[in-house]
Image (spheres, rainbow, N blue to C red):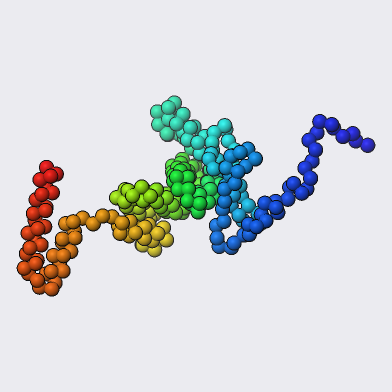
Amino acid sequence: MSKRNPDATPPEPDDLKDIAPLLKGWDYEAGAINVRKITGLDGREKLQMRLDLGLLQMELTGRPDGHRPHDRESYLDHFEEELARHRKVHGSADGFSLDTNQCQELREEAVMYYHRYLSLFILGDFPGVVRDTARNLRVLDLCGEFATDEHDRFVLEQYRPYLIMMNARATATLQLNDKAYQQALATVTGGLDRIREFFTQFGQENAYDKSNEVKILKRIARDVRRKLPVDPLDRLQGKLTRAVKREDYEEAARLRDEIQSRRRQRENSDA
């Protein structure tokens, strides 16, 4: 007969392991992304995503599962530090590489950040989306440049347009909230340029216009342009065009003179 160790941690009752109470009243909705923030036992906010068979719980900062590989926030941070150290010692990145296991670690980690930035987007936490999408783009860049295996170099590239779109979308939303319309438009058009470069790089120029990511950013760009203040000269030019169409040449001449006068005033003020 074995003796019980008095110092051993007593096993938890099964009812404390059952997650059913956590899910009560929070039904899974197929086709929807159901997320919420809760306060954890450590007093910090956590992020939860409802799944069909349970839920995911993530930290809001750092690595989503709370682990610190190599005492760093993530494998990405660890390998980027290794790369920086290699460059300092050797004067360049020549000779630095990532093997298949290391790339696998980076891919699995990137999935965690994907779940988090998707959840944060639903909750309207756009700074977190910008942070995590930019971070995952760094994973693609690192593997694309330093993976020793061709599969590891390119397997994640299929997600680059989506990451670019989500990053530009979240960034532009923050700028729109600040009424920085020109900046928001520049962000969106910059994202479109980067996606076009991606398809061109892989010889898929025809896929650009069919891309869902491109359609989303173009729709946002149209919405932003509607919010931009109308240039007075553009408004006068529109009136001039309409006056010419209805053959009101007297009004057209007056508008043409006013346009020329305002252009001279603008040129003088810019000089």
Rendered image quadrant of residue 204 = bottom left
Identity of the residue furthest to the bottom in this view: 246
Q: Quadrant of the N terminus?
A: top right
Question: Which residue is pictured at 50% across the width and 51% down the height?
Answer: 123
In this rendering, would 172 be left or right of 44?
Answer: left
Left of 43 or right of it: where is 244? left
User: Could you say which is closer to the camera, residue 216 or residue 41?
Assistant: 41
User: Image point 21% across, 55% down: which residue?
Assistant: 231
Residue pictured at 60% horizontal, 43% vertical: 39
In the foreground, 235 or 7: 235
Place of residue 36 in the rendered image (x, y in percent of width and height, measured from the top left): 57, 51
Residue drawn at point x = 78 percent, y = 35 percent: 9
User: Nearest the camera: 138 or 9?
Assistant: 9
Residue 113, image x and y in percent?
53, 46
If the image is split into quadrants, where does the C terminus sit? top left
Q: Is residue 112 above or below residue 251?
A: above
